Image (tube, grey):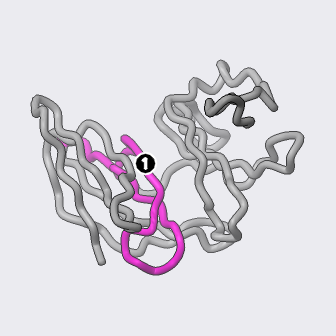
Amino acid sequence: MKISEGKIIAEEIYREDFSDILPWKIEACDLDNDSISDIFIGVEKETVFYNNVMRRPFFYSWDGEKLNKKWLGSFFSSWQLKDIAFGDYFGLGFHVAAVLEENENGECRISFYNFVGFGFENMKIDNTYRNIKAINTVKQDNMDYLKLDFTGFKNSVKLNYN
């Protein structure tokens, strides 16, 4: 990225065709809290051990030249992955994964996971909700809030767990 005449100019530094794994979300995060960005790619595919196509969490590290596999998961829990966001929602000084999960009855919950080197540890499971369509991280006053967007509503809800 460069700044020229007061404008930020982004340059492409890497290209890879991910069309075979059907990405639905790509986001930078700091999975292992080493201050080096990791890349989350949410994919819709089957895995070696699970032949049903569903949303799955894939994480990569970036070495300055290419993406390297870090954690290619089948799922976080028995609930389906619907969306994901990353932030320091608890004031711990490091980022965690906020995962919007949905069960077979259409109920949604937000679960918080911390990466522990070879997988994820569940930190907290929030309330059950209906009609959440997406979650995102919003920064305000040096704090991370989890923003919930609901189907059929214009307004969203911001949550902070500090």
Q: What amino acid type is highlighted by mark number 1?
A: Ile
Q: Nearer the viewer, residue 116 or 36?
A: 36
Q: Nearer the viewer, residue 145 or 60?
A: 145
Up-down relation of residue 156 to residue 89 (above or below): above
Q: Point out residue 101 in the picture as x, y percentages from the top left corner.
A: 33, 49
Asked if the stretch drawn in magenta spans residue 107, the answer is: no
Up-down relation of residue 134 to residue 92 (above or below): above
Up-down relation of residue 60 to residue 47 (above or below): below
Pointer 1: what residue? 84
Judge whether residue 34 can be spotted in this image: yes
Q: Point out residue 162 in the picture as x, y percentages from the top left corner.
A: 30, 78
Secondary element at image label 1: strand
Q: Nearer the viewer, residue 88 or 25?
A: 88
The part of the chain drawn in magenta is: 78-106
Label 1 packing within 10 angstroms: few (<14), some (14-19), many (20+): many
Viewed as shown, does residue 129 lie left or right of 97?
Answer: left
Viewed as shown, does residue 85 lie left or right of 28?
Answer: left
Q: Report the residue at 18% width, 44% height from top.
A: 156
Q: Report the residue at 40% width, 78% height from top.
A: 91
Q: How many marks?
A: 1
Q: Point out residue 25 in the picture as x, y percentages from the top left corner.
A: 51, 34
Q: Report the residue at 32% width, 60% height from top.
A: 145
